[in-house]
Amino acid sequence: MLEVKKAKLTLEDGTVFTGKSFGSETAVAGEVVFYTAMTGYPESLTDPSYTGQILVSTYPMIGNYGVPFNQKENGIHKHYESNKLHISGLIVSDYSFEFSHWNAEKSLADWLKEYNVPGLFDIDTRALTKILREKGSMLGKIEFEKEIEFYDPNKENLVAVASCEKKEVYGDGEHKVVLIDCGVKNNIIRCLLERNSTVIRVPWNYDFSNEKYDGVFVSNGPGDPVMCAETVENVKKVIDEEIPIMGICLGNQLLARAAGAETYKLKYGHRSHNQPVLLHGTNKCYITSQNHGFAVETETLPENWEPLFTNVNDETNEGIKHKTLPFFSTQFHPEASSGPTDTEFLFDDFISSIEKSKK
């Protein structure tokens, strides 16, 4: 019989869950959040937006299809959303020690150990999720023999950790797009490359004023947008030049702050594949994938800006746009992988705004 080591998850309210280890036997602390996807854990675990977080999967079984081969395509990892795991820890109800998939290279357990990330199973994730739903996202820690202190990742500039360190260029398409990397997901790059673009990926605080570009894309990323003052200042310059801008997730919050609006921390955050959002001015409701803990304060949008999408569940902001100029952003992920692709047409809208501005 397989021997596994016991460990505990302690929440800041004093609640303790005891589980069994299937990852690295490393004590970690961070913010405990949950997500509701049935599949796609390789994508979620490599999503930079989860930096500093202990991730709880609400789906009962995880690990049954292993981890895909680490292949590259167009200079980026084909099956992952970045080049490494970004979560601090993983909590599941039932872990499958046996995996089977035609594209599997290794087990999820081996993958976690490779990046020194702890994983616990045999945890009542239903009870844990109910606590997080009632009290909101909270701090937590995974401990083995040694006790550690709680740690609040939102007090750090997590974007500086998740962003690339130097400029990188992908593709040779007609449209030159500066991608501000605040913790970008690879599928954003894929979606831009598929639309005849050259992607100029730059660090979160990079001064790209000397670059030649047709549009600017502000990516997703982890943490509090207040930490990204340098990014906001760079986006303000693009707004002044009236060059097309699109933002996703953290990019929505940063565009809003560049416009003059405020942001705030959500009690729960949105982390799932099935969040309904309503397109303003229509009766169209789209199913979206999301992963964020902060949001735009709609009431603080300046006069020439307006909401683009609204969350049907809690009426929080899901996107903004300028009334006359080519600037817009979404709080959700239209490029979601894995997840619904109902709103991928927004990339077409962005490219269309670039084409119009070049005429």
Image (cartoon, rainbow, N blue to C red):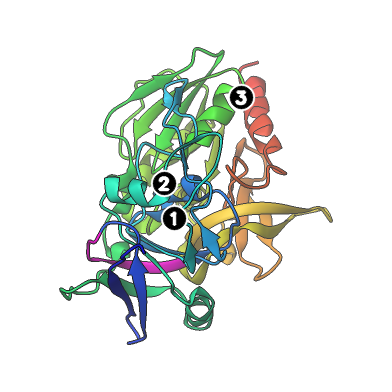
Kind of residue indicated by mark 3? Ile
Kind of residue at badge 2: Ser
Of badges 3 and 1, the one in the foreground is 1
* Residue bearing mark 1: 97
Label 2 packing within 10 angstroms: few (<14), some (14-19), many (20+): some
Q: Rate crowding at label 3 as few (under 14), some (14 to 19) or many (20 or more) other CA atoms within 10 Å.
A: many
- Name which quarter of the figure residue 83 lies in: top left
Q: Choose mark 2 or mark 1, whichever is in front.
A: 1
44 or 125: nearer the viewer? 125
Q: Nearer the viewer, residue 4 or 58?
A: 4
Where does residue 57 sit, x and y in percent of width and height? 50, 63
Query: Which quarter of the rendered picture does the N terminus lie within?
Result: bottom left
Q: Residue at x 63, y 32 (%)?
A: 350
Farthest residue to the front: give it: 1
**Residue at the spot of label 2:** 107
Nearer to me, 221 or 89: 89
- Reply yes or no: does residue 224 show up in magenta: no
Closer to the chain start, of discs 3 and 2, is 2
Q: Main secondary structure of the magenta part?
A: strand
The amino acid beneath tag 1 is Phe
Q: Quadrant of the C terminus?
A: top right
Q: Which mark is residue 354?
A: 3
Q: Is residue 315 visible?
A: yes
Residue 197 to residue 42: above or below? above
Task: Indicate the secondary structure of the residue bearing disc 3.
Answer: helix
Inter-mark Cα distance, 3 to 2 = 43 Å
Residue 32: say if magenta. yes
User: Residue 324 occupies which quadrant of the picture?
Assistant: top right
Residue 86 at least partly seen: no
CA–CA distance in space, label 2 to label 1:
8 Å
Label 1 sits on a secondary structure element that is loop
What stretch of residues is rendered in magenta? 25-33
